[in-house]
Structure formats: structure tokens, C-alpha cells
Amino acid sequence: DVKVTQSSRYLVKRTGEKVFLECVQDMDHENMFWYRQDPGLGLRLIYFSYDVKMKEKGDIPEGYSVSREKKERFSLILESASTNQTSMYLCASRSGAGGRGGYTFGSGTRLTVV
Amino acid sequence: AQSVTQLGSHVSVSEGALVLLRCNYSSSVPPYLFWYVQYPNQGLQLLLKYTSAATLVKGINGFEAEFKKSETSFHLTKPSAHMSDAAEYFCALASNDYKLSFGAGTTVTVRA
């Protein structure tokens, strides 16, 4: 089975800190995604990457950046954390082949900014 | 533009009763549709997916969904609810550029 591993389940950070959320997948998938999940809003796409060193803005990229230096790792960066970025963050990956299926999600990182 | 609407943010059913979760979509291309389940403090698990083959899709844990193009719907059902079905359920749509768009989610509670 494909595994998507998010390095932290829970994080507490202070306002203004630079925060790194890490995501690693073990099945050589080309595409990787970062979503945030908030009650009543579902999941919203922050950034995605079709391949190494490629990145595209999603629906809510403001306040975030990403890095994909290696195929298996996709990092989400909060340049200066703010309280409105308190949320659950979910990483996903999928193979570039085989149509629009085959997404696999990590277990999530619950970030609290104080 | 693609979008997904889940009707009802909260559904409460009795154990053994029918579970029906509603999802409507809007898509300019033939859609790929998914239902995911999320248990407390966990990630998303795929229940089932529609990828333009059979319109009635069977998934895990006894769930199934029917794609109805004329109604732009993809409702999820389970004939008999179990206590373990208590979770949050998300309908999602995959666009041509492989992004997933999600509905707002429906929380299911099961009464003993």
C-alpha cells in the first residue's frame, strides 16, 4: 500500500514563527498536494506539485509556500505563522498515470498557532 | 468551474437504519467522483470512486453510491447503519488537472 507520512500529528507554534510541515510518500508518485481542513469548509487546496521542483497555487495559497526538492517529499511552509492558520493540514499524493484516481492521504497535522 | 455541494452538515440515524448522504456536483467535463470517510483525529480513507464505468459503485464497509448524470448527483447509501459508521464523510470531484475539490462534509452520528 502507498503510504503518505506527515512528520507531526500535533504542533503548537507561536505567532510569527516560521513553520515547516513535512510530507513524505513512498510510492514514487509524481503529484503531491497540501490541503487545510476547517469545520464547515471541508478541505481546501493550498498548493500542489506535479513533479520535482514544480509547484502550483491552489485556492488559498496566501501566507504559505512550498518546496519540492525530491520526488518523495513535499514541504509546506508558513513564513510567519498567524492564529488564522490554526487548522488541520492534510497531505496527499497520486500517481501521474492512470487518470484522475488514486489519491492517498496522510493522517494529518493539527497545527495550533498561539 | 468544478464544485461539490453536500446537503446536510449533520445526519443522525438509528443503528440498523438507512444511511443516506447527499452530494451534488458541477463540472464542465465528465466527472470523477469520490467519497471519503474521516474518523476522529485521522486522515481521509477512500470509500469508493466513480470513474465513468458502472453508475452504481460499491465501496468498502457496505457503502455504495449511484452516479446520476441527469441529476448531477452522487449520493452515498448504506442499508443498515452500524455504530462504527459514526464519522465525517466527504464527497470530492477530480478535475482535469487532477485537483480534488471537496464538499463541506457531513458528520454522521449513530444512535443506539
Image (cartoon, helix red, strand yellow):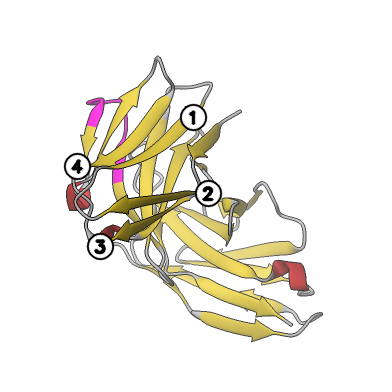
Could you classify mark 1 by the number of other residues whose Cα lies within 10 Å: few (under 14), some (14-19), or many (20 or more)?
many
Describe the element under mark 2 as helix, strand or loop.
Answer: loop
Give the letter of the chain under mark 2.
A
Instruction: Tell me the residue that label 4 is attached to.
Output: B79
Q: CA distance from mark 1 to mark 3?
A: 33 Å
**Is residue B61 highlighted in magenta?**
no
Tags 4 and 1 on a common chain: yes
Q: In the image, residue B57 lies at what x, y percent? A: 23, 34
**Nearer to the camera, A76 or B4:** B4
For the residues labelled 4 and 2, say whether their Cβ atoms are less than 8 Å apart: no
Tag shown at residue B112: 3
Describe the element under mark 4 as helix, strand or loop.
Answer: loop
Give the letter of the chain under mark 4.
B
Instruction: Tell me the residue that label 2 is attached to.
Output: A50
What are the residue bounds of the magenta stretch? B48-56
Camera-near label (1 vs 3) is 3
Camera-near label (4 vs 1) is 4
User: Is residue A1 something one can see in this rendering?
Assistant: no
Task: Look at label 3 and name its amino acid.
Answer: Ala
Residue for point 49% across, 38% down: B7
User: Is residue B44 something one can see in this rendering?
Assistant: yes
Residue for point 45% across, 42% down: B92
Quarter residue A114 falls in = bottom right
- Tell which circle, 1 or 3, labels the residue nearer the N-terminal end: 1
- Tell which circle, 4 or 1, labels the residue nearer the N-terminal end: 1
Could you classify mark 4 by the number of other residues whose Cα lies within 10 Å: few (under 14), some (14-19), or many (20 or more)?
few
**Nearer to the camera, A18 or B24:** B24
Residue for point 39% across, 36% down: B33
For the residues labelled 2 and 1, say whether their Cβ atoms are less than 8 Å apart: no
Instruction: Tell me the residue that label 1 is attached to.
Output: B25
Tags 2 and 1 on a common chain: no
Could you classify mark 2 by the number of other residues whose Cα lies within 10 Å: few (under 14), some (14-19), or many (20 or more)?
many
